[in-house]
Amino acid sequence: MAFVLDASVTACWAFEDEDHPQADLALRRVRTEEAVVPSLWWFEVRNILVVNERRKRITESGTASFLRDLTRIPIRVDRVPVEAEVLRLARAHRLSVYDAAYLELARREGLPLATLDRDLAVAARAESVPLLGES
């Protein structure tokens, strides 16, 4: 089954010093299942990488290699969020509009959400959106 992949999980894959069971599960699942992301994911992932280049956690060549590896993963970019629902979710759960976009996508498509963001996970549960790996 497909799932919604957020930037926090994707970023975890980029750094050797980060390890999280949710990210590991998502990486295993994405080898055989499609991941779905809102269009902002592209920008978020690259911003995380560039910020961490500045912090010396990853090199430019490491970023390039990681982005190349991402192109081999079946990731579908959703470009049609339901604006009113994104705003409702952001307001109701005190989320950023960015985080609400992931939640809106998971709700709309009836897919589990892979996230390491605690507030987003709480909001997902409140909205009856399953988290990847949870029943």
Image (cartoon, helix red, strand yellow):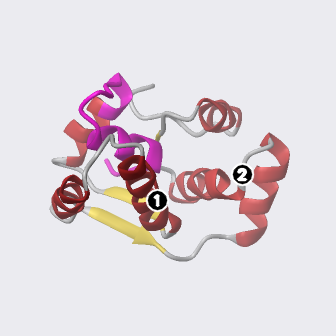
Q: Could you say which quadrant of the image residue 35 lies in?
A: bottom left
* Alpha carbon separation for disc pair 1 and 2: 16 Å
In front here: 15 or 7?
15
Residue 58 vertical position relative to residue 61 in the rendered view, above or below: above
Whether 42 is drawn above or below 51: the answer is: below
Q: Where is residue 11 in the image (x, y as percent from the top left)?
A: 37, 45
Closer to the camera in the image, 98 or 105: 98
Marks 1 and 2 in Cβ contact (< 8 Å): no
**Callout 2: helix, strand or loop?**
loop
Q: Position of residue 63 (x, y in %)?
A: 26, 57
In front here: 41 or 78?
A: 41
User: In this orientation, does residue 40 appear?
Assistant: yes
| Marker disc for residue 47 | 1
Percent position (x, y) of residue 71?
A: 20, 65
Question: What amino acid is found at the position of numbered circle 1 in the picture?
Answer: Asn
From the viewer's perspective, is 38 left or right of 107? left
- Residues drawn in magenta: 1-23
- At x 34%, y 51%, the residue is 2
Image quarter of the C terminus: top left
Neighbourhood count class around disc 1 (C-alpha, 10 Å): few under 14, some 14–19, many 20 upward: few
Residue 104's image quarter?
A: bottom right
Q: Is mark 1 on a helix, strand or loop?
A: helix
32 to 123, vertically: above or below: below
Which residue position is annotated with label 2? 96
The answer to whether one can see residue 4 in this image is: no
Residue depicted at x 47% and y 66%: 43
Mark 1 / mark 2, whichever is N-terminal: 1
Residue sitting at x 53%, y 52%: 106
